[in-house]
Amino acid sequence: MPMTASPIHCRGLFPGDDDQGASHMPTSSLKRLLALAAVSALSIAPAAAQQVYDPVAKPQKVTPAEAFSATSNREFFIATVHLDGRTGTNPQAADPANFFPHPAEAFPANPLPAGGGLILKGPAESGAWQMRAFVFSPAQVVAVEGDTVVLNFVGAQGPSHRIAVEGEEGEFVLKRGETKSVMLKSVKAGVIRFASLDRLPSMAGHILVLPKR
């Protein structure tokens, strides 16, 4: 029969608790009590099943016919990405082990464009400094006039992004690990822009809609 842990009620451990006698418990006794409670909980808790990602064991079975089925929609998956470059004002600042020999690079004297998409950090005492650029991948997709376009935004890097699509009302927040979709019906020839409002100017893209022949 499986064992279950009973909750441990400790009253009077902090100032303001209603058990005045317990509030004067010596610190050493309190530490022993908490340690014993932790060990007891671990000893009777069921072991968690280890989750291992194995794409070979359970592949998603899709046929070419299913993958390339005829559809009037043009569907795209657009990931939030940041590109990082690490270097230093001396050759070994960014790579102390000298695994990849690297020349010294001076820290940029001019500021980057404002908007949150381009970030410089450093230099540290060691001379190391870092550049980060937020982008969409891909940043350009192509459709034909009259198509229905589905943009599936994928939160891959960056904790959250405020995303807006030109011609659509408002904005939405995309967090890491989420996907959110925007459907544009019967698009007209021209350019439709989208952007992460907190990561401009680099985190922006567009749909290039070609005229229908």
Image: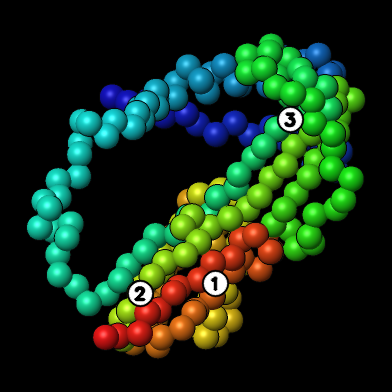
Disc 2 and disc 1: Cα gap in Å?
15 Å
Q: Residues within 10 Å of mark 1 (few under 14, many from 20)?
A: many
Q: Residue furthest top?
A: 97
Q: Is residue 48 visible?
A: yes
Say what amino acid the circle numbered 2 marks.
Ala
Circle on res. 87? 3
Q: Which residue is mark 2?
A: 143
Q: Residues within 10 Å of mark 2 (few under 14, many from 20)?
A: many
Say what amino acid the circle numbered 3 marks.
Thr
Provide the secondary structure element on which disc 3 rests: strand
Q: Position of residue 87 (x, y in %)?
A: 74, 30
Residue 107 appears left or right of 177: right
Provide the secondary structure element on which disc 2 rests: strand
Who's the residue at 80% across and 41% down the image?
Answer: 121
Say what amino acid the circle numbered 1 marks.
Phe
Q: Quadrant of residue 40?
A: top right
Who's the residue at 72% across and 42% down the image?
Answer: 131
Q: Residues within 10 Å of mark 3 (few under 14, many from 20)?
A: many
Who's the residue at 60% across and 21% down the image?
Answer: 38
Q: Earlier in the sequence, mark 3 or mark 1?
A: 3
Between disc 2 and disc 1, the foreground one is 2
Residue 138 appears left or right of 8: left
Q: Quadrant of residue 200?
A: bottom right
Disc 3 and disc 2: Cα gap in Å?
39 Å
Rendered position, 35 above or below 14: above
Q: Which residue is mark 1?
A: 194
Between disc 3 and disc 1, the foreground one is 3
Q: Earlier in the sequence, mark 3 or mark 2?
A: 3
Q: Looking at the image, which is closer to me, 59 or 194?
A: 194
